[in-house]
Amino acid sequence: MRRIISILMENEPGALSRVVGLFSQRGYNIETLTVAPTNDPTLSRLTLTTSGSDRTIEQITKQLNKLIEVVKLVDLSEGAHIERELMLVKLKATGAQRAEIKRTADIFRGQIVDVTSSVYTVQLAGASDKLDAFLESVGEASILEVVRSGVSGIARGDKVLAL
Amino acid sequence: MLVRALKDEGVETVFGYPGGAVLHIYDALFQQKSISHVLVRHEQAAAHMADAFSRTSGKTGVCLATSGPGATNTVTGIATAYMDSIPLVVITGQVQSDWIGDDAFQETDIVGCTRPIVKHSFMVKKTEDIPATIKKAFYIASTGRPGPVLVDIPKDLTNPAITYEYNYPAKVKLRSYNVVSKGHSGQIKKAVDLLMAAKRPIFYTGGGVIQGNSAAELTELVRKMGFPCTNTLMGLGGFPGDDPLFVGMLGMHGTYEANMAMHHADVVMAIGARFDDRVTNHTSKFCPNAKIIHVDVDPASIAKNIPVDIPIVGPVDQVLKEMLEQLEKTDEKPDQQAIEAWWKQIDAWRAYHGMRYETNPDLLKPQQVIEALYQVTNGEAIITSDVGQHQMFAAQYYKFKHPRQWINSGGLGTMGFGLPAAMGCLVARPDATVACVTGEGSIQMNIQELSTCLQYHFPVKIINLNNQSLGMVRQWQDMQYQGRHSSSTYEESLPDFIKLAEAYGHVGMRVTKPADLEGAMKEAFDLKDRLVFMDISVDPTEHVYPMQIKDGSMRDMWLSKTERT
């Protein structure tokens, strides 16, 4: 099952490589990874998505917790949560295609952020499956380049992952 | 600044090898008297010595190496300590800060190289951070589930020309590292209840009992309950090997009765053990009828390989103490009738196939050598070993009475560990009798340390079980590859170990006949202040039994070359 694990860790050199190293070292899989400092500059927030059996996920969270630089972590998929991913995509936009892509972008609440005579660059944010659906709608043939940020997530309600 | 911090940490001995990036540190060591230094002949040995110093004394060992090759040579030693959860602080020099990343002479990213095999590592960025980093390193290495910590220090930071105010913190507080100090009382209660109701219980204990200094508590608990107790390879000495409640080691080369008892148990009480693949055999067939209680300081060890019914996260000594207190308060007693019947069954297994081997008047058996070693040393010596058949024979036939008496590389299985380990033991306990049980394969992996032994007068007794082949490899080739001995023999290229020992300034002794064994061994151990290299010719065709059959359950074993369960 797909899981979103959100980690609060020391914002120190080497901390990220320890997290990433743990996954390759123990044969776990990272699907997406995003990391940036928080409002407290001594802390970084790292969100990753992975998949595995309940037992594997339990081991992943235990092993992550053992890393000295990991302060706190939460498996967001255990409760209600919001997940977002940002995507920038360059699409071929000539002739009749131009209007079609504009319409599809509107339906998905995307924005066209850059335009040339033959190319539209669309910005889209949402859950990962929404981004997948957009790419499917515009079709493989018109896609020139895709950049995705990886998933960021936060729990719904009063629950907070902070010190 | 570094040397002063080590002094403040109570370090008395550092094992190491100098080189460019650590010359400032070596100069500081030269100018003081409270920390002594042991100059090894290869940095791997320095790491093993510091590791064995920890294993014997319970204190954290320290080793020191220069940048580049010095640092990379410690890697096997670090991995060895990591796999066996041994506290170790490894200090490496690094090229000067402004050269890092330039592929400078003797530059290696040792923090990167060792990342998967350390508990934690530090690259120091500022001189004034050195004392606090050292404090943290010792704290992390020795608390919780112990492990090796590496501290990499660029050369410019140790330059004596730059001075800073020295501040050694009295305490460490890390917001992201909290050690469990106590097991959950409710869980402990549940465990006690389960043990009381058990009909076929067994204690299965590992290195955690040794590292967690809880052999006394374990012994009291086992004796109080009257249940059988088995130890893992790392746990030997955690419960007295000559106690009637001890059923021997379990696992791949465990005793018949220990493995049979595990398989048929209804309650398994695992303490400081990690359900290693060398213990469980196929995990899906492991202890099919047992409820499992697991006490461990590391939550990640629990339910990693085998699902557990009652997990207890906490330091083993504290959990066992609380368990004993709870037992004091309760009037409940274990089910005497069931336990008697259980012992009758175990005794029957023991009688059917206890540890045994065939002797031959002309040819020494390796088992015989270990038994003689046990006799001659009254079972009181510290025994270190290398890896292979000799290691298993030592584990099976030397009945370890005390914790920290059996020093071996269980997790990583590092050949070349035994000799430097014996030296580290002698630094921790200079008056102890220390024997290194090894083979002609393993001993050659760190034989250069014979020179260090002369320099520092380490009277190690080397018991070389010479079967003229890589015995364990050969055994597997016999059993699984129709006897094709691919690269497991030396074709007459073995050195004359007697001459070799003598060339290094030690005493060499050769034993080839069973009749000479005990006399020679007595003679060797009577030479108290000399290193004696006993080269003992043993039967090259001997196999280690019992041996679990791959992918089977715990009770599926070869008992000899022809018998299986």
Image (cartoon, coloured by chain):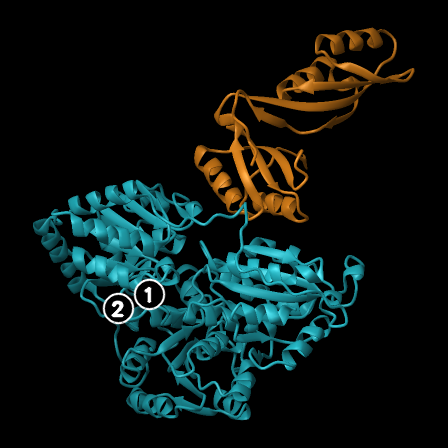
Q: For chain A, give the colour.
A: orange
Give the quarter of the figure containing the C terminus of chain B.
bottom left
Q: In this view, does B22 lie to the left or right of B481?
A: right
Crowding around mark 2 (Cα neighbors within 10 Å: few <14, some 14 to 19, many 20+) is many
Q: Which mark is residue B236?
A: 1
Residue B373 in the image, given as x and y percentages of width and height:
32, 81
**Which quarter of the figure has residue B266?**
top left
Crowding around mark 1 (Cα neighbors within 10 Å: few <14, some 14 to 19, many 20+) is many
Chain designation of label 2 = B
**Which quarter of the figure has residue B242?**
bottom left
Residue on which the image places disc 2 = B241
Q: For chain B, give the colour.
A: cyan
Residue B281 in the image, given as x and y percentages of width and height:
36, 51
Q: Nearer the viewer, residue B461 or B157?
A: B157
Name the element at disc 2. loop
Q: Which residue is drawn at 35% across and 41% down?
A: B307
Q: Nearer the viewer, residue B155 or A29?
A: B155
Q: Is residue B461 left or right of residue B518?
A: right
- Which tag, 1 or 2, sits closer to the chain's start? 1
Residue B148 in the image, given as x and y percentages of width and height:
53, 60
Q: Is disc 1 in contact with disc 2, using a CB cutoff of under 8 Å?
A: yes
